[in-house]
Image: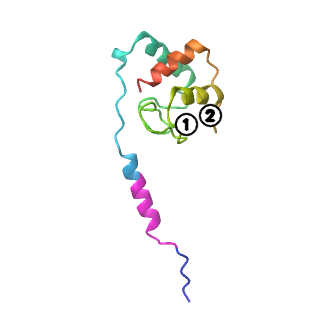
Amino acid sequence: MHLRSGFDPLFFPVCVWALGLAGCQSLPTSKPSSEWTPQEARGAAVYQQKCARCHYPTNSHPLHGPGLQAITKVKAMPSGAPPTDERLTAVILHGRGMMPATPVDDPQLQDLLAYLHTL
């Protein structure tokens, strides 16, 4: 006797294919470092010191955390929240999920946010 569980064996492969297509959308390119303002360059240094060990800056592939290419240009961050400076600040300063809080002073934070807008 065959019991139908309601599970379609093609459901999972179709979902994986659909998610793959969604992930293939190209993201806006990052601003070249030769065009950075002094504030963006300082922010890149803060990023290298505080963020680079866990986040790739110029692609969306995960390292220990999500890649951050176009993080300020997409509709939603990996958490699903819109990428406003206020939300980015909250995540940076207080952490979220597996991401620990990142201690930065206000000038470093402003420089970092400026840099994140170049990605």
Q: Is residue 88 left or right of residue 39?
A: right
The x, y position of residue 94, in whole percent, is 65, 28
Which residue position is annotated with label 2?
99
What number is the disc on residue 89?
Answer: none
Question: Could you classify mark 1 by the number of other residues whose Cα lies within 10 Å: few (under 14), some (14-19), or many (20 or more)?
Answer: some
Task: Identify the residue shown where x is 52% and y is 42%.
Answer: 80
When the figure is inspected, residue 1 is found, relative to residue 28, above or below; the finding is: below
Task: Identify the residue shown where x is 53% and y is 80%.
Answer: 4
SS category of the residue bearing label 2 = loop
Colouring convention used in this rendered image of the protein: rainbow
When the figure is inspected, residue 11 is found, relative to residue 53, above or below; the finding is: below
Of pointers 2 and 1, the one earlier in the residue sequence:
1
Task: Identify the residue shown where x is 45% and y is 66%.
Answer: 11
SS category of the residue bearing label 1 = loop
Which residue position is annotated with label 1?
65
Mark 2 to mark 1 CA distance (whole Å): 7 Å
The residues colored magenta run 7-19
Judge whether residue 14 is colored magenta.
Answer: yes
Q: Is residue 48 left or right of residue 93?
A: left
Judge whether residue 63 is colored magenta.
Answer: no
Q: Is residue 110 visible?
A: yes
Q: Is residue 101 visible?
A: no
